[in-house]
Image (cartoon, grey):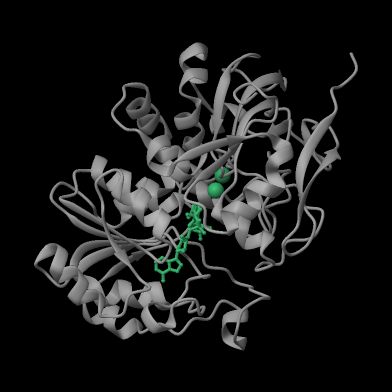
Amino acid sequence: MSQPSNRGVVYKGPGKVAVESIPFPELALGDRKCNHGVILKVLTTNICGSDQHMVRGRTTAPEGLVLGHEITGIILEKGDDVEFLEVGDIVSVPFNIACGRCRNCKAGMTGICLNVNPARPGAAYGYVDMGGWVGGQSDYVMVPYADFNLLKFPDKGQAKEKIADLTLLSDIFPTGFHGCVTAGVGPGSTVYIAGAGPVGLAAAVSAQLLGAACVIVGDMIEDRLAQARSFGCETIDLREEGDMEDKLEVILGEREVDAFVDCVGFEAHGCGCNAGKEAPATVLNSAMTITRAGGQIGIPGLYVTDDPGAQDEAAKVGALSMRFGLGWAKSHSFHTGQCPVMKYHRALMQAILFDKVKIADAVNVQMISLDQAPQGYADFDGGAAKKFVMDPHGEFVA
Ligand SMILES: NC(=O)c1ccc[n+]([C@@H]2O[C@H](COP(=O)([O-])OP(=O)(O)OC[C@H]3O[C@@H](n4cnc5c(N)ncnc54)[C@H](O)[C@@H]3O)[C@@H](O)[C@H]2O)c1
Ligand SMILES: [Zn+2]
Ligand SMILES: [Zn+2]
């Protein structure tokens, strides 16, 4: 049988991506056999703020990298060692690649698997320094350790019907939820979420799902703040002058929050009169300022070890100017790193399937074709209040 052709979204240097012909996947990564893997026909694959860090030239990502770590697909072919999945199953792929066999995987820390990236713990599809696994913004992609990694949807018809929500299980819904869990959000919490991009909005919905009393989202893009208000969040426009504590007092009657979630990361911009200027530690510093003593700070926003585009020498190696003494004085807990998607994806799938949450509406999913990737990347970079989801085989968009 002749193999179908394959196309992928390829990073072509700062500010540029292109849809190009790429090899059809094999059950291998170089010399490494992946008989435990499957080949998926990609149903949906999303553009992420994490991709933007690479496409803006703010990482050491090499040109030619096939992008895409947010993948949902149908199993087209399976390796001999795959026991519990079948051809035709519709599955969500956690963006973390995990072996299921190392001490970290066994402890549920699948974001820092020890066996999938020779350079450092943790791997992902189509990402710089993440093990060289090929990205899934493509027609077809290979997923290793399939029995361990994949989440199978119980009903294929229902999966397609709810695809705009379910596609968010590969990353941002679990990531936003994890941000809230690690910030200690529970019933009655007051929560501040920095960033109203898709991860921030997913965190805001998650905080509501966890029972927060009040969810406040801060950003400097009005359309994104309006999106947060559309499902009941309070918002703070960071272009406006004034102290964060004063703004919180107006909303909460208190000058601090119980829980803080950083959904911005190292490309953070300054607030007030500094809005627009980059200030990589600003979110971490406001976290320590406005989180109550004893409070927790969840940091899904990404921080890097190398940033060729940084404005100063220290930031070029990821060293930031944090007022860490303040966090220490307030006994803050900080939680960083990749979200271990698998910890949450089944429960969040159930919340979607039983209509307990409307995550696609909250993040404003917009389906586009694979060919529209360059425009999707450009619009997202421009601050569109949308989560772009690509549909390579035209199953959902005409
Ligand atoms: N930890 C993980 O597993 C994980 C997973 C997915 C994404 N991420 C990271 O989460 C972050 C957010 O992702 P996204 O897709 O929402 O990206 P995004 O770029 O769309 O959103 C970031 C938002 O932060 C806003 N912002 C900038 N400076 C700010 C400030 N000082 N205060 C408040 N808001 C500010 C921007 O205007 C933007 O709307 C990225 O760093 C991404 O890499 C991490
Ligand atoms: Zn992502
Ligand atoms: Zn492992």
The image quadrant of residue 240 is bottom left
Above or below, 211 relative to 142: below
Residue 183 image position (x, y, % from top left) = 29, 58
Which residue lies at the image location 29% right of the left edge and 50% below the top edge? 229
Which residue lies at the image location 25% right of the left edge and 80% below the top edge? 243
Of 99 and 201, nearer the camera is 201
Above or below, 46 relative to 379: above
Which residue lies at the image location 27% right of the left edge and 48% below the top edge? 207
Of 253 and 315, nearer the camera is 253
Which residue appears farthest toward the left when viewing the image?
253
Residue 133 image position (x, y, % from top left) = 71, 45
Please identify the quadrant where the C terminus is shown. Answer: top right
Residue 322 image position (x, y, % from top left) = 40, 82
Which residue appears farthest toward the bottom when viewing the image?
313
Residue 42 image position (x, y, % from top left) = 66, 28
- 222 left or right of 1? left
- 252 left or right of 358? left
Please identify the quadrant where the N terminus is shown. Answer: top right
Above or below, 86 relative to 342: above
- 177 left or right of 312? left
